[in-house]
Amino acid sequence: MSQRPHTPIVPPRATSAEAAAKQLYFWRTTAVAALILVVILAVLNWVVRRSPPAPAAVTENVVGAASTSIATPRLMPWGRLLTESIIMERPDGLFSDPDVYFETGLPWRFGKSPKETVTKLLQEAGLPSAPRAWLLDGANWQLQGDEIVVVPPSELLFNLTADSRACIYSFLAQIPGNRFKNDPFKIATNLAPMWFEDAGVSVETERLIRSLTYRRGPMVCFSDLGLLADRIPTTERRAVLKALSRLPAQRAFLRIEHGDDLGAVANYWAAAGRMPDMLPLLDSLRHSPDGGRVDLAYLLPRFCRERLYTFPDHATQLDAGAVDCFWTALNFFRYPPEQRFIDVASRMGYLRDQYEVHVGEPALGDIMAFYNTKDEPVHACVYIAGDLVFTKNGATVFSPWLLMSYRDMLAYYSVDAEPKMRVLRARKSPQS
């Protein structure tokens, strides 16, 4: 039987219409899949936005850590230090009569500055034309003995620019007797937005005050309370004073983790004399699975613990208006405190004889002394740990004892130029 030759089976060729239909089907399917994916992603994004945010790994500002985003601060010689920023306000008792602060017509006292110096200052202050003409008119100057005194009208003061105000007030700040220029109300520029936050001050009053501020170094300053006297309600005066007097401070805690070796930590804080009493608590935290933290105030000497976050009180301390930063620094390890350090000659002599300049990392209790461009001492504080210092910024009842960050404290004393700092270490234990 003869066989037919084998013919391969070839599928029929698709027509152009069928090919177009298949291509259309492919793109439609792809488009639908992409649309579904977009919808799914949108739903997931909506769910995430509606969900409560996860807690941050660290809510405090961590001193001594490489980053504030890590869960546990790095162990330093003083331990793991956690800090949180707070704002201190002066208590109502320190403003028993707010009205006395709103004195009008305060003079500008140029002291014994030569007339040529005063004229040059006013010429170079960038004054608007009307204030410039009035201030340069010698008929508006008074001579009190050999001192030049000028009493500008309030209209002129309102017309000063911030730069003109800064130029003139910075000059006046160097001459005694210029109230609120020698020691203006001030706050660091990075904290200025919250100066009046929740202070009970009206928007109009805040706007008026901010229009009268000026810059000195890293600080925003205000010196013209008298201009507010007849422009704000008398019921606002106390709130204004409290807001203007706000000070940045730090609360600090020692964080103990499970299994920590407390040997080095105990050695660092031993100088304060509190470690024997605190070791049982710290040891209990070390054995706790979750660890824990202790307020740093408990580790500090008694002098510091009793005063931290408080203001001098005339009712209990006769020299409340005289104790200052140097008195505070030299009494850090002492109890009761020694009043001899109120006397400038006594404390400067003691610093010269009993302390020496330390080169290297500071340690608990070292005094950080600050000097102006004439090498005159202007401030002293006590180093605690990390970025923290114990300080009293001023010799008035309005200046509390605080823990501050070194940066915030330095800004307070850098209104004209950043001072030179030296670390002073006692030649022998101040407690001996």
Image: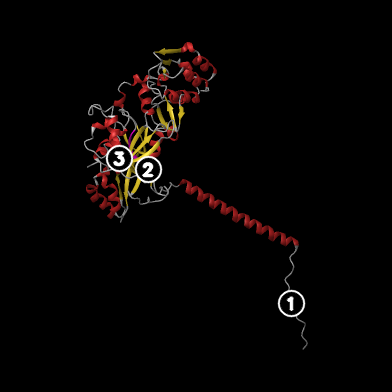
Nearer the camera: disc 3 or disc 2: 3
Tell me the amino acid under the disc marked 1: Pro
Q: Which residue is drawn at 50% across and 15% down?
A: 136
Percent x, y of residue 14? 73, 65
Residue 245 found in image quarter: top left
Q: Name the residue under label 1.
A: 8
Q: Which colour scheme is used?
A: secondary structure
Q: Toward the viewer: 244 or 198?
A: 244
Residues marked 2 and 1 touching at CB (< 8 Å): no
Whole-number angstrom distance, CA of label 3 to CA of label 2: 22 Å
List the single residue furthest toward the front: 353
Q: Name the residue under label 2.
A: 387
Total label count?
3
Q: Is mark 2 on a helix, strand or loop?
A: loop
Identify the disc placed on residue 355: 3
Relative vertical location of residue 2 with respect to residue 163 in this rendering, above or below: below
Q: What element carries label 1?
A: loop
- The answer to whether residue 255 is magenta is no
Tell me the amino acid under the disc marked 3: Tyr
